[in-house]
Amino acid sequence: MDSIYELTKRSLAICQDRVTVQRNKVHYRNLVLTDFDLVGEIDLLKKTIAELIIVTATKYPIIAQELQEHLSNYKRSGDGIIHHSALIATLNCLLEIENPKSQEKNTKVFISHSSKDEKVIRSFVSHILELGVGLDSIDIFCTSIEDMSMNNGDDIRSHIKNNLLSSDFSLLLISKAYKTSEICLNEMGAVWAVDNTVRLYLLPDVDYESIGWLNDTKKAEKLSDSIALDSLHKELIDFYHLPDKGITWSKNREEFLLSLNEL
């Protein structure tokens, strides 16, 4: 069976080159109305998308579900044009995620946060990720830290998207400021769509009762919880095969918790 990347490329080519939108004029009394039909190799497209759903189901379950929904409602006429356009958009997204060139980028950990929490984020990155876990600054994308964000002239939306797509882990650091930021909530939606390893951490100004539907994920941990930090530390060092410097980790974890209380 073809790889996800190759099968996605083939599906997209069929969508764009072998299925076309036909515009029809419908005369009704004194009016001329317009509707649209899809013409071309519809059956081939459906077969290819069905194969793609199978190979993406484990790695990208949300994307596979999205493809299945549009495939199930794909019709030659009526609202089929809507699902055709949605398929193209979803395939483009999947193609970029699976593009080997995208996977060569350095980002390992993507941090979604509010810029109003910059001091907390800087302490977290320094004590937990760099000094504690042992990640290099080039492995971390964080918009509030200059060396880990973007260069002058970069398109911010494209830059964030590319780093998100190339990351292994997405850490969502939720605060009151995060919950009220439209940009942060949009970023959260992108994180769920990419479907990499997502971890949610609550800053001290929010609790489980105040995060609403996020609590239903059963994934949220408190950033002030040393056990949760120990779990993140172990997960990252195991995943990246980094040495476990126990004393160094404990020291930096406690320094972070102390700075969190002070902030």
Image: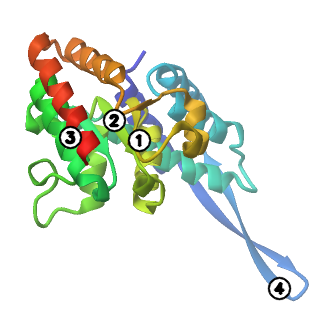
Question: Can you identify the residue that label 2 sits on?
Answer: 170
Tell me where residue 45 appears, x and y as whole percent: 57, 36
* Residue 191 circle label: 1
Q: Residues within 10 Å of mark 3 (few under 14, many from 20)?
A: some
Q: Within the image, what quadrant is residue 173 found in?
A: top left
Question: Can you identify the residue that label 3 sits on?
Answer: 259
Circle 2 — which element? strand
Label 1 near label 2: C-beta < 8 Å? yes
Q: Residues within 10 Å of mark 1 (few under 14, many from 20)?
A: many
Q: Which of 143 and 99 is in front in this view?
A: 143
Circle 4 — which element? strand
Question: Can you identify the residue that label 4 sits on?
Answer: 31
Q: Residue at x 10, y 59 (%)?
A: 151
Q: Which of 41 and 191 is in front in this view?
A: 191
Query: Distance of mark 2 from mark 4, alpha carbons?
Result: 53 Å
Tell me where residue 67 appears, x and y as whole percent: 57, 36
Camera sees residue 3: yes
Q: Which residue is drawn at 87% across and 89% down?
A: 30
Circle 1 — which element? helix
In the picture shown, does residue 238 fall above or below 69?
above
Q: How crowded is mark 2: few (under 14 residues within 10 Å), some or many (20 or more)?
A: many
Question: Relative to 212, is 57 on the left or the right?
Answer: left
Tell me where residue 46 appears, x and y as whole percent: 61, 34
Q: In this view, which residue lies farthest toward the bottom?
A: 30
Query: Distance of mark 3 from mark 1, alpha carbons?
Result: 28 Å
**For discs 1 and 4, the disc positioned in front in the rendered view:** 1
